[in-house]
Amino acid sequence: MIDEVLEAREKRYDTILDLIKKYKLPVICGKINYPGSNKNTPMSQKAYNILENLIISKFKDHIIEQKNTRGADGNAFILVVNLNPIKAKKMAMDMEIEHELGRIFDIDIYDLDGSSIGREKMGVQGRKCVICNSEARICIRERKHSLEDTINSIDKLINKYEIEI
Ligand SMILES: [Zn+2]
């Protein structure tokens, strides 16, 4: 299972590198940060659809090519944009911070050298935990929440958003 996830990530990264090489432009990759070994649940699919629509509307004036990939690592939306990578990162982070489901959005920007732009580089804090609001990486490191609790909280968040719109 882990191997399949790693393999899916590698394959996706190859696709990203090919696109960067082809267009000499930055690439955006949007995924859902969904916990557990099954990344393709109906709930993660719902969240992914919401994310995909959001990314398209946010970047619509800058899209050069778009692609979907699907694998053991879940769905991913890949976009070539004619934007400065730092500007694209800023727009992606706005979505992660402002949107109700932003905490489970994972929107990476790949620069022309194939590296992804970290949040640290942008002078912003790390992400907050979906359950307790502490710094997410501390909760993960300390295994503060069970997998079941984490999945339940995230599914609830997705359901709540669906009902509101
Ligand atoms: Zn927490």
Image: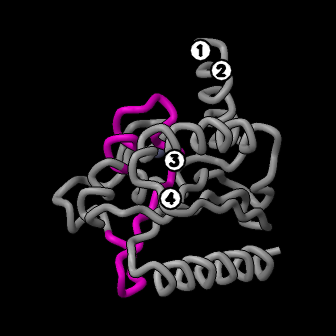
> In the rendered structure, which amino acid carries the disc numbered 4?
Ile
Give the mark, 4 or 1, whose residue is nearer the N terminus: 4
Q: Which mark is residue 162?
A: 2
Give the mark, 4 or 3, whose residue is nearer the N terminus: 3
> In the rendered structure, which amino acid carries the disc numbered 2?
Glu
Is residue 116 rendered magenta in the image? yes
Q: CA distance from mark 4 to mark 1?
A: 30 Å
State the image coordinates of residue 163 (x, y, percent, origin top left): 66, 13
Circle 4 or circle 1, nearest the eye: 1
Q: Pointer 2 and pointer 1: residues touching (CB < 8 Å)?
A: yes
> In the rendered structure, which amino acid carries the disc numbered 1?
Ile
> Badge 1 is on which residue?
165
Which residue sits at x=78%, y=82%? 3
> Badge 3 is on which residue?
105
Q: CA distance from mark 2 to mark 1?
A: 6 Å
Tag 3, which secondary structure? strand
> Badge 4 is on which residue?
140
Which residue sits at x=72%, y=36%? 46
Tag 2, which secondary structure? helix
Q: Pointer 4 and pointer 3: residues touching (CB < 8 Å)?
A: no
Q: Residue furthest left?
A: 123
The boundaries of the magenta stretch are 92-117
Q: CA distance from mark 3 to mark 1?
A: 18 Å
Q: Residue furthest top?
A: 164
Classify residue 134 as left or right of residue 32: left
